[in-house]
Image (tube, rainbow, N blue to C red):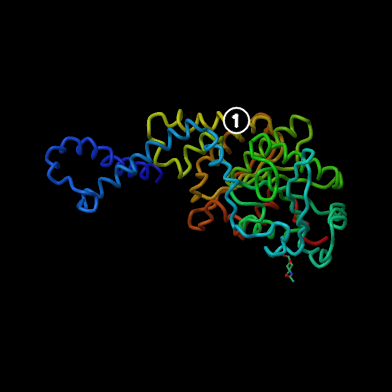
């Protein structure tokens, strides 16, 4: 499929490239047709459009190479706020009537926005409650899921909210936040900052919850890169989380950038790596989950839809292969669950799967704490 796509792309761009030498060659013959722009025929107009497209096509890699920070912006997409007008202070507007919005300071003077959704059966009790009440719910016997979102949008993005609802209906607390540079959080993004914000929220949770309560980490998309960074750090410190769940993950950012639809028109260009991928590395963006799995020791669940076009399925599969060969993971459950294309879950809709509750309880080896 991907191969076929690529062939079409090559075929499509060939005539464009050939046309220009052709144009030069037929130059003299065209001389008498040289008239002001509005008199140009359809062919002339087409040629102009082609020229402009070619110019754009050629300038983008050069611009990216000269200004590598553009590449970082394209990866984080933190400036894209969708939906635009949502008030992150009011999770109720998104149908979350049992969610508390608050702010933490991972660094003095730097605030990040956090949402805590309590298990759904507490929703009545949650009405009109403030932070103290929400904090006190961590003492109940409900496990906690720390959710690390992907690029673009905020913690209030719809597919994210829908997942919080599913998880909370199963009896989990869901804690999610916007990394610095996203949503209403201060600061500007970087891989290191995303990871340290995640670590900060994790530690904040650890200090508040019952020692015996499971704390799981769930990453989606770019958030899976943050998640493996975080879990690697925790394992290095000798305190792994209870489980790691990776939804639509990739192996590392270079391979992901190569497969992203955005780079489709460039990926066959000689020098693609030098123009685009090296610019990513120059920003210190690596997200090497395939390497991190060699330093992780806790159960790992990977979820991936076969029709995912943003992070292609084969990258999730490849990460799973790396994880199942990892020495540090031997003795831990490493599971891969794929969702067939016929379900159309793509990149963002795995939360729709009616199988998700069973998949989670099978993997976590426990019934959901719905009734408690
Ligand atoms: C509040 O949220 C819970 C959990 O999602 C839901 O079951 C309930 O119907 C909601 N109540 C109202 C009044 O919207």
Q: Position of residue 118 (x, y in %)?
A: 78, 58
Say which residue appears at 28% left-offset and 38% top-offset: 17
For disc 1, the marked residue is: 284
Relative depth, front residue between 181 and 136: 181
| In the foreground, 130 or 251 | 130
Side of 4 relative to 198 (left or right): left
**Image-based side of 216 in relation to 350, left or right:** right
159 over 288 or under it: above or below: below
* Front-most of residues 188 and 35: 35
Q: Nearer the viewer, residue 110 or 278?
A: 110
Residue 293 lies in what quarter of the image? top right
Q: Any atom of ligand 1 within 8 Å of the CB at mark 1?
A: no
Within the displayed image, which quadrant is ligand 1 positioned in? bottom right
Mark 1 lies on a secondary structure that is loop
Q: Position of residue 273 (x, y in %)?
A: 46, 30
**How many marks can you see?**
1
Quarter occupied by the C terminus? bottom right
Q: Residues within 10 Å of mark 1 (few under 14, many from 20)?
A: few
How far from the left and from the top, in percent, is residue 336? 59, 44
Q: Residue at x 57, y 53 (%)?
A: 348
Kindly identify the residue that appears in the image at 87 percent across and 47 percent down. Answer: 210
Measured from the top left, where is residue 76 in percent x and y?
Answer: 58, 42
């Amino acid at each position: 499929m991907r191969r076929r796509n690529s062939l079409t792309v090559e075929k499509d761009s060939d005539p464009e490239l050939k046309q220009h030498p052709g144009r030069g060659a037929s130059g003299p013959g065209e001389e008498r047709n040289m008239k002001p722009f509005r008199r140009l025929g359809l062919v002339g107009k087409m040629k102009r459009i082609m020229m402009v497209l070619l110019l754009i096509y050629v300038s983008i890699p050069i611009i990216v190479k000269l200004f590598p920070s553009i590449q970082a912006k394209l990866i984080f997409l933190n400036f894209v706020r969708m939906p635009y007008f949502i008030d992150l202070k009011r999770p109720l507007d998104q149908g979350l009537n049992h969610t508390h919005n608050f702010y933490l300071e991972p660094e003095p003077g730097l605030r990040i926005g956090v949402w805590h959704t309590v298990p759904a059966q507490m929703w009545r009790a949650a009405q009109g409650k403030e932070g103290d009440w929400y904090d006190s719910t961590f003492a109940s016997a409900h496990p906690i899921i720390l959710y690390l979102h992907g690029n673009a949008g905020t913690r209030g993005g719809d597919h994210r909210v829908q997942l919080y609802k599913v998880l909370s209906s199963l009896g989990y607390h869901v804690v999610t936040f916007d990394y610095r540079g996203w949503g209403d959080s201060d600061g500007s993004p970087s891989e290191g900052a995303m990871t340290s914000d995640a670590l900060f929220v994790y530690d904040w949770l650890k200090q508040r919850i019952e020692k015996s309560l499971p704390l799981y980490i769930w990453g989606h998309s770019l958030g899976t890169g943050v998640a493996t960074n975080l879990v690697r750090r925790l394992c290095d410190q000798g305190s792994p989380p209870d489980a790691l769940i990776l939804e639509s993950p990739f192996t590392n950012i270079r391979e992901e950038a190569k497969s992203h639809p955005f780079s489709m028109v460039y990926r066959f260009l000689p020098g693609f790596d030098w123009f685009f991928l090296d610019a990513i590395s120059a920003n210190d963006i690596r997200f090497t989950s395939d390497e991190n799995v060699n330093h992780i020791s806790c159960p790992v669940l990977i979820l991936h839809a076969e029709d995912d076009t943003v992070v292609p399925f084969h990258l999730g599969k490849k990460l799973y292969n790396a994880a199942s060969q990892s020495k540090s993971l031997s003795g831990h459950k490493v599971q891969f669950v794929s969702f067939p294309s016929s379900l159309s879950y793509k990149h963002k809709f795995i939360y729709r799967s009616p199988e998700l509750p069973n998949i989670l309880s099978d993997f976590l080896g426990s019934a959901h704490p719905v009734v408690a």
